[in-house]
């Protein structure tokens, strides 16, 4: 019963149906896979060939035993969705911006601002357009010191204790009334970044954990680990 | 546990409208199945978890493109999961993973009637047609599909040149297609 009906020895390896079959089987290399996927996106006939092979081989997928994924995947997935915890955190930051704007004169904030100045010890010029943010996580030590000049639109970033988890990048954001805008990745040394046009001094600087090279979407996708408010210098 | 088609369709429709709760429900119903598939192909658990999350983000974005008239939802979900898993192992250029031990008899499992979300006739037809292939060719097809093995890995496993594996795969696939067309 096996070995009968020997297939045609003249199988044409360039046959598009065999390419589709190998695509579904998974034996093409990365470049070939990409070429087939691109062709299928343009050509309905190529797409149909792939779908037919998916149907033919699907019963094999049914044989593979299920495995429960660890709960952290579900949590990370829901956090990453729009409206998920990360998006809610950004919304909360936006709320904080508004509250800080209203409470700008409050003694508590002034005291906190003063304490930060003392900790950082910069030259205190009463200033036109110059601001400082001490970006903090949960602890008492600053993670980043960001000095902003709204007249030039340049911010100087100095990491103090910011540590990226392995295989991840830390990305810096300006969160204003329009939502988060990417400023760039946090490097090991001091760096300069350009603020988005219209950046106002009542914004918040935040740092999120992103895939290597930064958020692929232009919005924070990972957890926000540090935030800090801009204070007039 | 396998969710019924009607439930999965309802959830996909909700996801297409941007309802995150429906995605969470779909995840609860389907993630063990998809994670099982991914883990057979991408054996690094950390990377397999990344692939799984990526698969559901893809489902979140693509749910609107699911057409109920094109087929039941589970094969659609499985296709996304297999594609992402295979992409994740093919993108690495270096030799990956330990030599396969190939303990599972996937062909025997296909005939085993307890895993049955797919129509009996489809399953039986594929099992019958796989059964008619040359045993080594069949093993190549099944190891590639179920475990995501590349031509190079198969060549090492069977101690044959890559070109021979290519020929085996092509003959096996052409024969499968012909057989399935006559059986069904």
Image (cartoon, coloured by chain):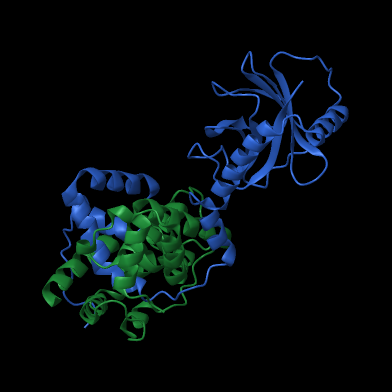
Chain colours: A blue, B green
For the N terminus of chain B, which image quadrant? bottom left
A128 or A48, which is in the foreground?
A: A128
**In the rendered image, the vertical position of residue B17 relative to residue A132, given as above or below:** below
Furthest-bottom residue in view? B113
Task: Say which quarter of the image contains residue B10.
Answer: bottom left
**Residue A54's x, y, as percent?**
27, 63
Q: Which residue is at a point 29% across and 43% down the rendered structure image?
A: A38
Q: Residue at x 51, y 65 (%)?
A: B99
Going by the picture, which residue comes out furthest to the left?
A: B182
> Camera-side residue: B143 or A204?
A204
Image position, residue A25 (x, y; %): 32, 61
Q: Image height check: is A148 above or below B114?
A: above
- State which quadrant residue B132 falls in: bottom left
In this picture, residue A145 sits left or right of residue B75: right
Q: Is residue B138 visible?
A: no
The percent coordinates of residue A104 (x first, y second) are 72, 30
Q: Residue at x 68, y 24 (%)?
A: A191
Percent x, y for residue B84?
Answer: 41, 55
Res. A35 image quadrant: top left
Left or right for A23, reference A10: right
The residue at 25%/53% (across/down) is: A19
Residue B109 falls left or right of residue B48: left
């Amino acid at each position: 019963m096996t070995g009968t009906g020997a297939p045609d020895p003249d199988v044409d390896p360039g046959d598009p149906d065999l390419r589709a079959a190998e695509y579904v089987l998974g034996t093409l290399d990365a470049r070939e896979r990409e070429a087939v996927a691109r062709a299928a996106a343009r050509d309905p006939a190529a797409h149909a060939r792939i779908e037919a092979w998916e149907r033919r081989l699907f019963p094999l997928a049914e044989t593979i035993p299920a495995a429960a994924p660890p709960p952290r995947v579900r949590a990370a997935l829901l956090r990453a969705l729009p409206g998920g915890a990360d998006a809610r955190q950004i919304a909360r930051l936006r709320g904080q911006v508004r509250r800080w704007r209203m409470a700008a004169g409050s003694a508590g904030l002034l005291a906190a601002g003063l304490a930060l100045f003392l900790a950082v010890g910069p030259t205190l010029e009463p200033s036109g357009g110059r601001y400082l943010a001490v970006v903090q996580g949960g602890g008492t030590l600053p993670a980043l010191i960001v000095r902003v000049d709204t007249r030039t639109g340049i911010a100087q970033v100095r990491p103090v204790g910011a540590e990226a988890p392995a295989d991840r990048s830390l990305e810096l954001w300006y969160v204003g009334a329009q939502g988060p805008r990417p400023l760039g990745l946090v490097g090991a040394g001091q760096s300069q970044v350009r603020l988005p046009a219209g950046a106002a001094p009542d914004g918040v600087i935040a740092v999120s954990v992103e895939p290597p090279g930064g958020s692929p979407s232009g919005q924070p996708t990972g957890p926000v680990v540090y935030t800090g408010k801009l204070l007039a210098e | 546990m396998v969710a019924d088609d009607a439930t999965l369709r309802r959830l996909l429709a909700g996801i297409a409208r941007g309802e995150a709760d429906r995605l969470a429900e779909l995840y609860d119903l389907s993630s063990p199945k998809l994670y099982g598939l991914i883990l057979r192909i991408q054996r690094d658990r950390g990377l397999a978890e990344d692939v799984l999350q990526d698969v559901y983000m893809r489902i979140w974005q693509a749910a609107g493109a699911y057409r109920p008239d094109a087929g039941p939802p589970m094969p659609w979900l499985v296709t996304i999961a297999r594609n992402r898993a295979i992409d994740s192992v093919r993108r690495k250029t270096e030799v990956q993973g330990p030599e396969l031990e190939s303990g599972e008899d996937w062909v025997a499992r296909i005939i085993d009637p307890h895993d049955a979300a797919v129509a009996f006739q489809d399953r039986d037809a594929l099992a019958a047609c796989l059964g008619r292939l040359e045993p080594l060719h069949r093993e190549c097809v099944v190891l590639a599909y179920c475990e995501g093995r590349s031509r190079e890995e198969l060549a090492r496993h069977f101690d044959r040149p890559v070109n021979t594996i290519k020929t085996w795969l092509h003959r096996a696939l052409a024969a499968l297609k012909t057989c399935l067309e006559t059986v069904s």
